[in-house]
Amino acid sequence: MTSIFYIRHAEPDWTVHDDQSRPLTAKGLKDCQLVTEFLQDKNISVVLSSPYKRAVDTVSPFAKGRGLDVQLIEDFRERAISSVWIDDFAEFVSKQWEDFSYKLADGESLGEVQRRNVAALKEAVRQYKDKNIVIGGHGTALSTLINYYDDTYGHKEFETMGRIFPWVVRMDFDDNGFVKMEKINLFDA
């Protein structure tokens, strides 16, 4: 059995508009301890992450404590939205969930994000067969993965998860592929 523990990053500092360098807030940095505590007994062999700062910073304390390197995987990055700040982000998100091909001129559709993240996830499962793997990532990227394996997960569920930083989804795979998924709110654990 291969188990993925996909960690949606801790609380980001929204005042930083650059998606790649957006850091965690002080609360986010403190909440990384929840991730470290949760993962302690999970027999983790590998830590992968989106290259974006907030994702790396969320899983780094655990990796460092275990003597593991954080391997950056470009395809686990968050979706590209646009080169300009979007004022009505809720409307944009709603349109994307209604139509997985909807995107702005210099952005990605949810379908594109999903294909990229599913391919990266399947490669991680193939490469680290029968290991327990941490992936540091993002809410939209994670939501498209959940939707791929459970098509009942949609905009409403995304909005609910959107307020939880950090958040964990465990996905198990055997030789035949996907087996099951568990959504874990660290604040309720």
Image (cartoon, rainbow, N blue to C red):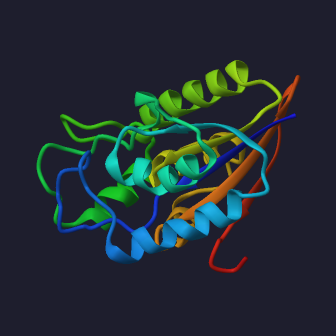
Question: Position of 106 compared to 2: left or right?
Answer: left
The residue lying furthest to the left in this view is 84
What residue appears at the point 73 percent right and 51 percent down from the top-left corner?
A: 170
Q: Quadrant of residue 22?
A: bottom left
Q: Is residue 80 above or below residue 189?
A: above
What residue appears at the point 88 percent right and 24 percent down from the top-left corner?
A: 176
What residue appears at the point 37 percent right and 54 percent down from the top-left corner?
A: 54
Q: Position of residue 53 (x, y in %)?
A: 33, 49
Q: Is residue 64 above or below residue 115?
A: below
Question: Position of 91 compared to 67: left or right?
Answer: left
Quadrant containing the C terminus is bottom right
Q: Position of residue 44 (x, y in %)?
A: 72, 43
The residue lying furthest to the bottom in this view is 188
Pick whichever, 113 or 187, lies toward us. Answer: 187
Q: Report the label total.
A: 0
Quadrant containing the N terminus is top right
What residue appears at the point 63 percent right and 47 percent down from the top-left corner?
A: 66
Q: Quadrant of residue 48?
A: top right
Visible in this render: residue 57?
Answer: yes
Q: Position of residue 89 (x, y in %)?
A: 27, 63
Pick whichever, 180 or 31, lies toward us. Answer: 31
Question: Position of 95 compared to 130: left or right?
Answer: left
Visible in this render: residue 165?
Answer: no
Q: Position of residue 106 (x, y in %)?
A: 19, 34
